[in-house]
Image (tube, helix red, strand yellow):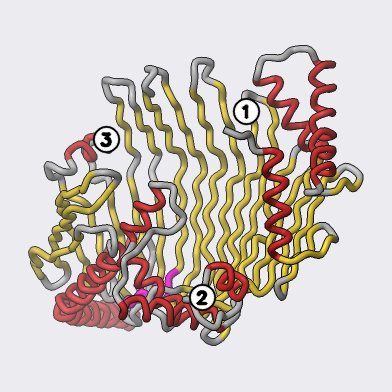
Amino acid sequence: MKKSVGILCGLAIAIAVVTTAGAWYTGKQLPRELDNSIARANQELVKALAGVGGSATIELTSLDRHLFTSTAHYRIKVKDVQAGELPVSFELAAVDKIEHGPFPWSRVKSLKLMPVMAAGNARLERTEATASWFAAANEQSPLRVHSSLGYDGGVTSELELLPLKVDEANGNKVDFTGLRLRVNGDRDGKAVKIEGEAGRLDLTLIDQMQLPVTLQFNGLTIGGDLSRTDHDSLYVGSLDLGLAEARITQGHQQKLLLIKGLEQNNLYGADGDKMHGRLEYKIGDITYDNRPVGSGHMLFTFKDVDMTALQSLNDWYQTRLPEFREAAAAGQVLPNIDMGPEERAKVQADLQKMLAAKPQVALEDLSFKTAKGTSRFNLIVDLGNPASLDLPADQLTRQIIARLQAKLSLSKPMIGDLATLQAFLQGQTDAQAIARQSGQAGEMVGMMAVQSGMARVEGDDVKADLHYADGQVDFNGKKMSVEEFALFLNTQMAGVVPRG
């Protein structure tokens, strides 16, 4: 018995020595780790705000060190960051209670017994800028971050956004059940795994007619496994988002638009210095005013994209982001950018390097399905490397687009389903008349398509095909030059576009 007690006492002493030594070591290492983390965070903030204007920085304002714990205070400054039409500036304060390793008590209590260098428990502090946020969270810190730093450099963080509730006098309301986000990675951000979920977000907004617009989002999920490539801002791996349902109610009659099963699934990969990707979007089911509408799907892919050129063009784009935003707001596809000779030569060299890899972009599937039919469209474009980017526009387009293939299939029964829905929403009640009009809608589209030469009818589908390569166009089986095809389209459009 005495021997067993002696062994246990010796083990306890050994653990105490190791723990104390580890805590001392962590305390000595901590300032350097914090400085490195803040420096990396500020570098990422510079990248995130490039082209937006303004700045955001994180500062370590104080560090109070003890043997087993330390307390760090931070200040987050945001100055003149463009958010909508007006620049935004504010300051936030945060405090982090850091437990030294190898066995932080908060982890031991949770039976997390793997030794770590440190465990942090950070939260926002109440300031003038966050007073309303604290009030919405029942006077608790609305944002908390629990993290741990392993001796191998691994970083585990859990971000917790507490439930929030706001009820304004003008009728606007917010009710949020909170969000949890777990992130595992390394201290340099080269690899990261993400997993998160949020329960429910309810918003009530009063519109200009003093009518409520209610939005409810339920069942948000986030998942990802990403690794940074040798190119600073390019990652490969997967990133998935999901939303169980979205409810939108508005108008005098407060009709409900219900969307279920929203998904975004992104997958990126690399072969050598070439990048490829797959971006998929799904809508499981749409109903409006308790009437079925349909479901949707979109799949976009790309391959053979030169990552060196892409990284360089992305860096340039960030510097010109305000001009692209202004062009988009004005309805322009591309802004008119005034570039000097060196900048123009650099951008053109990057573009030609990317085109030299002969990338392909494809809208592999854009489809919409109702109870009676499915309509689809797909488009594949193979790009080529032009002799010069200074060629006239028509020549440049021909050399850049090496091959193009598109297919359209419109379901006449699907068109009938949508016509039926429209009739009901317009208040029509005669079921026989609605059925007759809906059946005629699909037939009318088919007849107009055939008469115009823009499509053909095959069974219940209205179809059109376009293929382009080597300066020749094949449209629905008719071969013609690019000039002949352009003339054909102008002629057909002149017949359907009303004259002013």
Real-space Cα separation, disc 2 to disc 1, in angstroms: 50 Å
The residue carrying mark 2 is 391
What amino acid type is highlighted by mark number 1? Tyr
What amino acid type is highlighted by mark number 3? Ala
- Name the residue: 78% across, 49% down: 454
Name the N-terminal-most of marks 2 and 1: 1
State left or right for residue 245 relative to residue 437. Answer: left
Residue 20 appears in view: no
Work out whether 281 lies above or below 415.
Answer: below
Name the N-terminal-most of marks 2 and 3: 3
State left or right for residue 261 relative to residue 183. Answer: right
- Name the residue: 38% across, 47% down: 329
Could you tell me which secondary element the residue under label 3 belongs to? helix
Q: Quadrant of residue 438?
A: top right
Q: Which residues are magenta?
A: 185-192
Work out whether 105 lies above or below 293.
Answer: below
State left or right for residue 89 relative to residue 41. Answer: left
State left or right for residue 175 relative to residue 13. Answer: right
What amino acid type is highlighted by mark number 2? Leu
> Extreme top residue here?
430
Q: Residue 191 placed where, x, y %?
A: 43, 75
- Magenta stretch containing residue 499, yes or no? no
